[in-house]
Image (tube, rainbow, N blue to C red):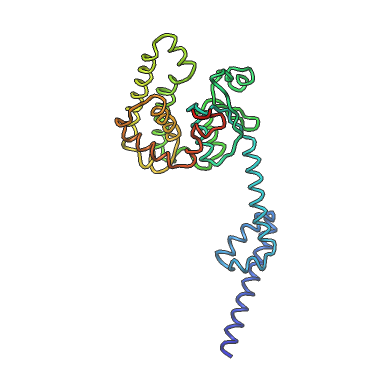
Amino acid sequence: MESWLRSNESKRAQQGSMQVYHFVYHSLQTCFCAPVTETLLAVVSLVQFLTQEEIYNSWPFCEDFYSNISYDMTEDEQKQKQKLKLYSNWRSSCSWRVRIALNLKGLKYEYIPVNVLKGEQFSPEFTELNPIGYVPVLVDGDVVVSDSFAILMYLEEKYPEHPLLPSNLNKRAINYQAANIVSSSIQPLQNIAVLKYIEEKVSADDKLSLLTYHITKGFQALEKLLKDHAGRYATGDEVFLADLFLEPQIHGAIKWFNIDMVQFPLLSRLNDAYSELLPFQDAMPEKQPDAPPHH
């Protein structure tokens, strides 16, 4: 008898929970559209009234609802990602930064190669996108953005997944400073147009000496700037904007300008850390469709 009473009591409790559940459901339904009602009710029932099994038993369309949400989000994501186009060059460090950002944010894009050695960046079609004739250019639907810094800021605001900037204002300022040292004080001298101009004025040895001087000067500044802020990466244990500028510049300095990194222990350590990250690996020059074989 006692066992029967306990069993009966349990059934009545479950029935009571179900009555409350249906009461809440119909009450919410009068105030909200069905998807909002269903979502709110799922949360309420999970934390207060029902087990997950009871939810599915009493809510036969629950699984369909969740699968539809998942499908719709995936479809929306696909539409979003399909409209992104990146005009890029395999070796361009500016394009490289943007490729890392797109990878970090999980954004797929159409890669449109621009052969800067052949001067394709000065074609009427390209200068229509970027009048100054530099890569990269990002096309997002009707929006066209050129200059890597501008593209990264656009991506940060439009696609906030995996933020490129820390919430801490001081760390954010350090990221801006590090990025600007690379983009304003080091990299511009490595643009093809600038290199060609330098070659017309000085010998090949003097050109290399000039480039290595400015790379070294910039790296010394970065070592001092980041020494009190670096963690696993440039400004802590998460990848942020500064890292996107540093990795291509460090890699290029080693591979193409023979910079001795022994004098830059912090930047060397960061470079090793970047090499372990898939979004960085996939953005490497040799993995781009326009990279020449055995470059």
Where residue 171 sits, quadrant-wise, is top left
x and y percentages locating residue 147 in the rendered image: 52, 25
Front one among 13 and 120: 120
Numbered marks: total = 0
Check the image and report above or below for 49 versus 87. below
Residue 170 appears in the figure? no
Left of 91 or right of it: where is 7? right
Note whether 179 is above or below 28 in the view shown. Answer: above
Q: Position of residue 30 (x, y in %)?
A: 70, 58
Residue 77 drawn at (x, y percent) = 62, 43
| 69 vs 189, nearest the viewer | 189
As drawn, which residue projects farthest toward the bottom? 1
Question: Where residue 89 sits: x, y (%)?
Answer: 54, 27
Q: In percent of the image, x 59 and y 64: which residue is there?
A: 45
Image quadrant occupied by the N terminus: bottom right
Q: Residue furthest top?
A: 201
In the image, 69: left or right of 231? right
Which residue in the rendered view is the most extreme toward the left? 263
The reply to whether residue 3 is visible in this rendering is yes
Tell me which residue sits at (39%, 24%) in the image.
257
Residue 2, image quadrant: bottom right
Instruction: Tell me the residue at 53%/39% (across/down).
Output: 103
Q: Nearer the viewer, residue 233 or 91?
A: 91
